[in-house]
């Protein structure tokens, strides 16, 4: 149980830090607006009225205000570095993957002794 609680807390912290909570709140607002409009209008008209920027609900207004508040108070991105950051040393030598064309060396001649007489065979077996 403590591990599940820790993971749930970590997930909630990550969602809050990344701004996904505002996206979820906006989705809930749209779902509630669509359900409200769909009770009295057709589905196409309910969808059109749900996403009409001239008709925001209280939750949509609150989400928009929260987005503007976090957008203005968020830290600015650091200025780009003027010099290049070297993460790994790179060798400047060039690799050439070509072999030198040449001849194979001549194989030495074999001086092994050769047999001059016939190979001895075992005597034939009698079938009697």
Image: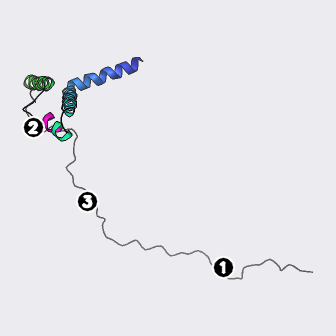
Q: Earlier in the sequence, mark 2 or mark 1?
A: 2
Q: Residues within 10 Å of mark 3 (few under 14, many from 20)?
A: few
Q: Quadrant of the C terminus?
A: bottom right
* Gap between marks 2 and 1 measured at Cα: 80 Å
- Between 39 and 65, which is closer to the camera in this rendering? 39
Magenta span covers which residues? Answer: 47-54
Where is mark 2, residue-wise? Answer: 83
Q: Residue furthest front?
A: 40
- For the residue labelled by badge 2, is the local secondary structure a helix, a strand or a loop? loop
- Between 116 and 12, which is closer to the camera in this rendering? 12
Occupied quadrant, residue 81:
top left
Q: Earlier in the sequence, mark 3 or mark 1?
A: 3
Where is mark 3, residue-wise? Answer: 96
- For the residue labelled by badge 1, is the local secondary structure a helix, a strand or a loop? loop
* Gap between marks 3 and 1 measured at Cα: 51 Å
Where is mark 1, residue-wise? Answer: 115
Q: Earlier in the sequence, mark 2 or mark 3?
A: 2
Whether residue 1 is situated above or below residue 41 in the rendered picture: above
Query: Percent x, y for residue 5?
Result: 36, 18
Query: Percent x, y for residue 71?
Result: 9, 26
Q: Residue furthest top?
A: 2
Q: What is the number of the mark on residue 79?
A: none
């Amino acid at each position: 149980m403590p591990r599940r609680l820790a993971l749930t807390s970590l997930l909630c912290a990550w969602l809050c830090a990344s701004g996904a909570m505002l996206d979820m709140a906006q989705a809930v607002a749209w779902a509630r607006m669509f359900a409200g409009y769909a009770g009295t209008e057709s589905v196409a008209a309910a969808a059109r009225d749900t996403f009409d920027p001239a008709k925001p609900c209280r939750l949509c207004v609150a989400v928009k205000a929260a987005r503007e508040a976090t957008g203005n108070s968020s830290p600015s991105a650091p200025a780009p570095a003027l010099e290049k950051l070297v993460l790994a040393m790179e060798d400047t030598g060039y690799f050439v993957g070509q072999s030198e064309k040449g001849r194979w060396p001549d194989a030495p001649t074999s001086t092994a002794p050769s047999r001059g007489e016939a190979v001895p065979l075992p005597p034939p077996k009698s079938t009697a």
